[in-house]
Amino acid sequence: MTLEHSTAMSLRICVILGIALMAVGLAMSMAGMGDGVLYAGILVLITSPFVGVVVTFASLVRLKDWYWAGIAAVLLCITAAGAAFAML
Amino acid sequence: MEALILAGLLLTGSTAGILGALFGLGGGFIFVPVLMLAFGLAPAEAVAVSLIGIIAGSVGASTVFVDKGLSNIRLGLLMEITTAAGAIIGAIVAGLLDEWLLMCIFSAIVLYSAARMIMNPERVIPPSEDSESRFAFEYRDEANDENVRYEVDNVKGGMALCTVAGMISSMTGVGGGAVKVPLMNIYMHVPIKAASPTSSYMIGITAFSGAITYLLSGQVLLEYAAGIAIGAFAGSIAGTSLARKLQTKHLRKYFSVLLIAVAILVLLQAGGIL
C-alpha cells in the first residue's frame, strides 16, 4: 500500500466512523437520550487529522524514507505541543 | 434542536464544504459570521463549532485528494511544521497587537494575492528528467488527462512565510488557506490543482489543537457542531468531484474572486460591521 493510500484509508475510516457516530448521536440527542454518542463522534472526527499524520509517519518509516519520516515526527511533536499549550 | 435549524446548519456546512474542497479554504470565513448572525451563537461558540466544521471538510476532501495524489502530503507536512509553530507564537503574542490591525494586514495580503493571480498566468517549474530533488513531485490532472510534474521552488522562504501565516491565522481566527494557497501557487510555483488540495489537507491538522481544546473544555455546542460537520463532510466530497474536473485557468480565476470576497468579509469584521 502506498503512502497516499494508507494515509487516505486512515482518514476515511476515522471520518466515516466520526460522521456515523455523530448522525446517530444527533438523533439520540434530539430524542432526549443523552449526548454521549454525539460527543464520541465529534472526538473521533477531531482526532482524525492527527491519526492521519501518525499513519503517514509509520508509512514513511516502513518505506525507509527517513527525511520525510523525520519531518512527520517533528510535526507530530509540534502538534502535540500546540494542543498541550492550548489546554494550559 | 428544531428541524429548521438543523437544515440550516447542514446547508451552511455543505456550502462551506464545497468551497473548501474546491479552493483549499477552511470555511471559517463562512462558518463564523453565519453562526453568529443567522444562528445567534456567541463569538467563542461560533469559533468552536467552526473548527469542527473545518476539520470535517478538510478530512472529507483529503480522503479523495490524498488517495488521488493531488494533496502533496510531504510538502504539506513540511509547511505545516512552521504553520503550527507560527500558530503557537501567535497565541503567545496575541495580546500585543490590535486584532483589527491584523485583519487589515491579512486583507491587504489576500487582495495582493488575488491581483497577482488575476494578472499573472500560472508558472510551473518542471523538474529535469533525471532530477533527484526531494522537492520534485507529480500528480494526475484528470481534467486534461495528463500527468503534471513540478518542482517546488523557494522552499525555505515559503516555510518562513507559513510561520507568518500561522501567526496571523491564530491571532485573528481567519486565513489559513487564503494565505497558503496563493503562497504555494505564486511564490513556490506549486500548480493550483495541487496547492488547493495540499492546503485542504493541512487545514485539518492546523485546526486539531484548537478544536480538541474547545471540546475537552466543554465549550462546543455538540448538536450545532454535528450539524455543521455532517454538512461540511457531504459538501467536501461533492467539492472534490468538481475540483478534479475544473481547468487550471478557471480554478485560479474563481479562486481570485473568492479571495476578494474573503478580504471584504474580513475588513467588515475588522470594522465591527459583521
Image (cartoon, coloured by chain):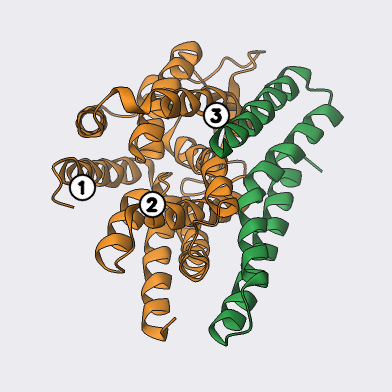
Q: Which residue is mark 3?
A: B80
| Residue B109 badge | none
Q: Could you say where residue B17 lies in the image, as x and y percent from the top left?
A: 44, 58
Q: Which residue is mark 1?
A: B265
Q: Nearer the viewer, residue B254 or A21?
A: A21
Side of B156 relative to B96 (left or right):
right
Mark 3, secondary structure of its residue: helix
Q: Earlier in the sequence, mark 2 or mark 3?
A: 2
Q: Could you say where residue B235 lies in the image, as x and y percent from the top left?
A: 46, 63
Query: Which chain's colour is green?
Result: A
Q: Chain of mark 2?
A: B
Amino acid at dot 1: Leu
Q: Which residue is mark 2?
A: B44
Mark 2, secondary structure of its residue: helix
Q: Could you say where residue A48 lies in the image, as x and y percent from the top left?
A: 66, 50
The answer to whether one can see residue B129 in this image is yes
Residue occupying the far bottom of the picture: A31
